Image (spheres, helix red, strand yellow):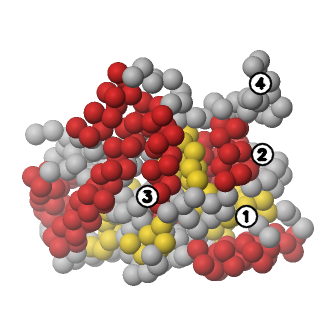
Amino acid sequence: MGKIYLSPPDMTEVERQLLLGAFDANWVAPVGPDLTAFECEFAKRQGIGNAVGLSSGTAGLHLALLLSGVKAGDLVVVPTFTFAASANAVRYCGAEPIFVDSEPDTWNADPDLVAEALERASSSGRRVGAVMTVDLYGQCADHGPIREACDQHGVPLIEDAAEAVGSTWEGRAAGSFGDIGVFSFNGNKVMTTGGGGMLVSDDAEVVERARHLATQAREPTLHYEHRDLGFNYRLSNPLAAIGRGQVQRLSSMLARRAEIRAAYEDALAPLPGVGFNPIDARGVPNHWLTVLVLGDDAAVDSAGLIATLDAVDAEARPAWKPMHLQPLYADATVLGGSVSADAFARGVCLPSGSSMSDLDLQRVIGAATDALSK
């Protein structure tokens, strides 16, 4: 009986053969034909014009902010309910995050609070360099009113779609709502290259600029010539080969995660005090992680449930701790905060990986049922 991880890589012979093909061709250098193909295939899958493969989603966020013109001293509006990378990339640019709380229906950035943050900044004379949304747990944010607020104030919109590959909102794919979108292929994501990311945009010049900066901003000369400050942010060809296989199998991996979410709901939702992270009917999430939400009448709290699952060798974790509650950002401005703080206090991320067997799924359900039925 092996350990059940939260969201481990899902690899098959498809990925193995593509990786071996790159190896056998000796395309192990940073760039090569698989990287070019991966960028094209991923962009086509997401319905976005252009893509550049990067070493991480965090690198993509950093470049997206720079390409949006964010400068030292700027403000950047960021959801407080997110992983630290979203906010950290803002500080890489010398800018200051201003956090906004979640809306209850999606757990994503509250559009009214985004508009309020922009109005406050405008009134105070502070420059807002960008608004960054986050498609939390694989559900797209409600970008329509956020885009309207950004356009009203002339502020670029960046979509952190790190968790949302394959998700849609009103029929439109994640990553396509911002001026720039960013995905993560970290080892725990729906699709992975072990480590990596992708920056996407319908603006070909933006993506070419990102590609230039990501390769140390080397000029096209015989010698090494540099006019801009660049970064070593490119995805490697062998990892891109793995990504090509993941793109081919994405639909089946999404379907399996949806099955896992449905199984958890069927078994656990009838129990007292048990709910789940909200899903808005306007979108189709990728169910990256299923988050169980415990009410006041639940038999155990989040720490108790996590301990119960750990006892049967199943990994579970609390929901994201909001950025405004993190010591690193204790001095940051936040608008609202109660919705995300409550989700953190009550939420438990359950094992959700597409490679999880039915037997392992029943082990998790059984342990959770025992704990929540007492």
Residue assigned mark 2:
94
Disc 2 to disc 3, C-alpha distance: 34 Å
Question: How far from the left and from the top, in percent, is residue 346?
Answer: 38, 66
For the C terminus, which image quadrant? bottom left
Q: For the residues carrying marks 1 and 4, which lies nearer the camera in this image?
A: 4
Q: Earlier in the sequence, mark 4 or mark 2?
A: 2
The amino acid sitting under disc 2 is Gly
User: Are circles 4 and 3 on residues that touch, CB within 8 Å?
Assistant: no
**Residue denoted by label 1:** 156
* Local SS, label 1: loop
Query: Residues under labels 4 and 2: Cα distance?
Result: 31 Å
Q: Nearer the viewer, residue 84 or 193?
A: 193
Query: Is the C-beta separation of discs 2 and 1 under 8 Å?
Result: no
What residue is rendered at 82% in x and 48% in y?
A: 72
Secondary structure beneath dot 3 equals helix
Where does label 4 land, which residue?
Answer: 221
Q: Given this view, does label 1 or label 3 mark the residue nearer the observer?
A: 3
Mark 3 = which residue? 45
- Amino acid bearing label 4: Thr
- Mark 2, mark 1: which one is toward the viewer? 1
